[in-house]
Amino acid sequence: MSQPLLSIPAATETLPQPYLLFLGDTTEAGYAKTAFGLRDWARERCVGEFACAGATVSTGLAFMTPLQAYAAGARSLVIGVANPGGYIPTAWFEPLQQALEAGLDLIGGMHARLADIVPLRETAARLGRRLIDVRQPPSDIPVASGRPRRGRRLLTLGTDCALGKKYTALALARAFVARGIDADFRATGQTGILIAGQGMPIDAVVSDFAAGAAEMLSPDAADDHWDVIEGQGSLFHPAYAGVSLALLHGSQPDVVVICHQPGRTHMLGYPQHPLPSVEATIELALQLGRRTQPAIRCAGVTLNTSHLAEAEALRLLSHERDRLGLAVADPMRGGAAFERLVEDCLA
Amino acid sequence: MSQPLLSIPAATETLPQPYLLFLGDTTEAGYAKTAFGLRDWARERCVGEFACAGATVSTGLAFMTPLQAYAAGARSLVIGVANPGGYIPTAWFEPLQQALEAGLDLIGGMHARLADIVPLRETAARLGRRLIDVRQPPSDIPVASGRPRRGRRLLTLGTDCALGKKYTALALARAFVARGIDADFRATGQTGILIAGQGMPIDAVVSDFAAGAAEMLSPDAADDHWDVIEGQGSLFHPAYAGVSLALLHGSQPDVVVICHQPGRTHMLGYPQHPLPSVEATIELALQLGRRTQPAIRCAGVTLNTSHLAEAEALRLLSHERDRLGLAVADPMRGGAAFERLVEDCLA
């Protein structure tokens, strides 16, 4: 019963680009993570930023009206901010309609769907523009086949949520490409999908089809092609482990990289559930992953050390490398540790 | 964008009962599994059966027109057959409208949604009847909390799909009640939901909320109350393991019972994936289940021996009991082996 207006970004369909980043009337930088993520990881696909009067947050990109952005090549406006409630305030309606009038499609990833807002729906219908919700999975996802696929695959897995699985996958995909390897970052969450321009919102897929969605996201490919897949949740997470397992089974990764935040003692928001160790996470990932990929191996670990001083971070990375006998790096610090992780992934 | 016409059976809402079972124009008994399941497990809530001209399959219940069924107490007509395509043929429209006119709500569990059929939707709207799709989960499912709940819980888990998880749970719940124990069968699939009159179609829930849906299905209860929860899929299934894990984590079962079909060598429809052993299934269920229920234990095993002669079945049950050191029964054969399983569940 969905409105046909919604164009759905599937694993195989690319979002209209480049983007104009919309910052709303935001005065709190923490709400603009999507805009910052796009600036940091997809700079070449962002022509500029746009905001309502009163906004104080900026990505540092050039301010453009929708008309200027369209002239500069933009083909969509991305809502780059999220309110705490996940809704679209009425103050945004006029600038969003302005973008539609200027020739841009609208892309959102909030809980509120763009097509549920009558003025936007009517304007888009009149002008033939698309209202795209990146949290909306495609409707043709099959049940997983379990059939082995050609090509190489890497999946990031976490001890918990929100500690670096997306950044690790992005950094590894970028490093692979820099070495001349044919590699794609495969996004599974809304910010990743906007960065990649396509992907699969795995956590929005009906559970019976979640492993099938993962298969769809990293299809058959050339033998030397790498898909670097953004992990979700954690196999130990009391709410999301099912998503993580479906993604693991469907991805059939040759290689996993475990992502961890040193110092975190409990699952975020779940004080009754202690964080699993890195070793336990490696062990469970390999144990469960073997079901669809018998040759699965762990190539290393990334640590999110953003809260540590440089010297302390390097000491910790080195200590963990010796303790685990694996490459251990912080992808945001790069360096020799990260180079070794890249090599061990490709080994 | 769903039609408000649809009334959604939540874990806490009961379907309109008793039922009139509708057999369509079916000539193939294999398509009428839902009707037979209701006759076998919810006989007291079925007033009779109804069919189109040309139907040759019967449940053996009295044939009634919708008007007769309403007079006999029926409050809904259940579509008890499924076509291979999962659609609703035009030949059914007239008898289904007749049921609406007679005062009955319609309940379906096919892929095709009743509310998508315009003549049914219009008639239901005019008469104030409900078109209920038991595959439609409620819209207010929360993310799982991981918080321990009061009351006792038992979950059936399988080495594969379609080998007796629902029948095992139904038989155990019935045996518990027969012993005077306060127990509920908690349904997670469409036939189970129709049998119980309520439940949670777990495989139709968006994956991020699947564990939350399991928590919702077996809420806080009295300390001596048992929820006997119908399992889905298998932790080893290449397509559905994520569903099984979410159900395991959200159910937080005190007790698991492993269901298996002796002689099955590979996952149904997945010839590349050998069936796991019963022992491996017990081990993985306990290992993963401990994350949300540290005291989880396996009370025994059920074998679906419907393809074996009585003597051979009893020999196998006895052999497996000795080999595994656990109660092993076929719930459909009952007997001392099943009595021991019931006792070990409650121990």
Image: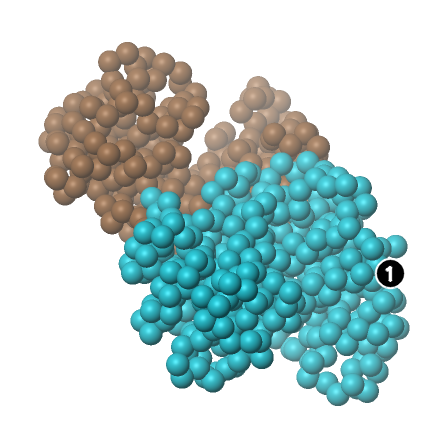
Chain colours: A cyan, B brown
Q: Is residue B76 visible?
A: no
Residue B73: give x, y in percent of width and height.
Answer: 15, 35
Residue A187: give x, y in percent of width and height.
Answer: 62, 56
Question: Looking at the image, is B221 positioned above or below residue B282?
Answer: below
> Which quarter of the figure has residue A175?
bottom right
Q: Is residue B9 visible?
A: yes
Residue B111: give x, y in percent of width and height.
Answer: 40, 35
Tag 1's secondary structure?
helix
* Residue identified by numbered label 1: A343
The answer to whether residue B338 is left or right of residue A254 is left
Q: Amino acid at mark 1?
A: Glu
Residue A318: give x, y in percent of width and height.
Answer: 86, 77
- Closest to the observer, B42 or B86: B86
Residue in the image at 22% along x and 37% along y: B121
Question: Looking at the image, is A277 positioned above or below residue B286?
Answer: below
The answer to whether residue A182 is left or right of residue B183 is right
- Closest to the observer, A76 or B18: A76
In which chain is the residue bearing label 1? A
How many badges with numbers are in the image? 1
Residue in the image at 53% along x and 54% along y: A16
- Closest to the observer, B5 or A78: A78
The answer to whether residue B100 is left or right of residue A51 is left
Mark 1, Cα crowd under 10 Å, few <14 / some 14-19 / many 20+, is some
The answer to whether residue A26 is left or right of residue A311 is left
